[in-house]
Image (spheres, rainbow, N blue to C red):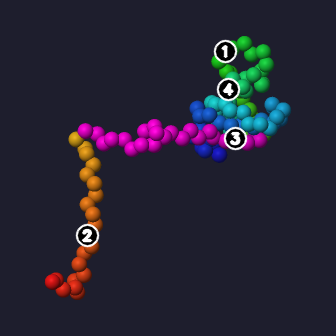
Amino acid sequence: MLSLLGQQVNQRVLVSLPSILGKSEPLECDLVACEASGLWLSGPDLTKQVGPGHSHEAPIPVFVPYSQVAFLYAVVVRRPTGPPGGQAADPPAGHAHSPAKPHSPKRNARTKRR
């Protein structure tokens, strides 16, 4: 399990911590590190919930034991594969794309030429 979570380190995750936060709604935060006994999470909302009155501007990583995590989802950011607007990009100069040649059916060897 750690290897799967390890792939998400430094990524945004949604995590539910009902026994810590008192609510089951997921909280978006950064997965800072994974250990054998729990996760290091960081985010401004998590810092506000866990340590009210926190005076630092940057969020502090918080260690959460696995026993306190109801669920965790990786936040997947899909990047567009093409240019904005969904239009195909022009080919680079010197690499003009020629249209495909129409397919010509092959003659059957048994047919006679006229």
Measuring from the top left, give residue 74's x and y in whole percent. Answer: 63, 40
Q: Earlier in the sequence, mark 4 or mark 1?
A: 4
Q: Secondary structure at mark 4?
A: loop
Q: Is residue 67 left or right of residue 106?
A: right
The residue pinned by badge 3 equals: 72
Of residues 5 and 105, the one drawn nearer to the viewer in this rendering: 105
The residue pinned by badge 2 equals: 104
Residue 76 within the segment the image draws in magenta:
yes
The residue pinned by badge 4 equals: 43
Q: Secondary structure at mark 2?
A: loop
**Real-space CA distance between mark 3 and mark 2, rounded to the nearest whole angstrom:** 56 Å
Residue contact at pointers 4 and 1, CB within 8 angstroms: no
Position of 13 relative to 111 (above/below): above
Q: Secondary structure at mark 1?
A: loop
Residue contact at pointers 4 and 2, CB within 8 angstroms: no
Residue at 62 percent across and 34 percent down: it is 12
**Real-space CA distance between mark 3 and mark 1, rounded to the nearest whole angstrom:** 25 Å
**Real-space CA distance between mark 4 and mark 1, rounded to the nearest whole angstrom:** 11 Å
The residue pinned by badge 1 equals: 57
- Residue type at numbered disc 1: Glu
Q: Earlier in the sequence, mark 3 or mark 1?
A: 1
Residue 40 visible in the picture: no
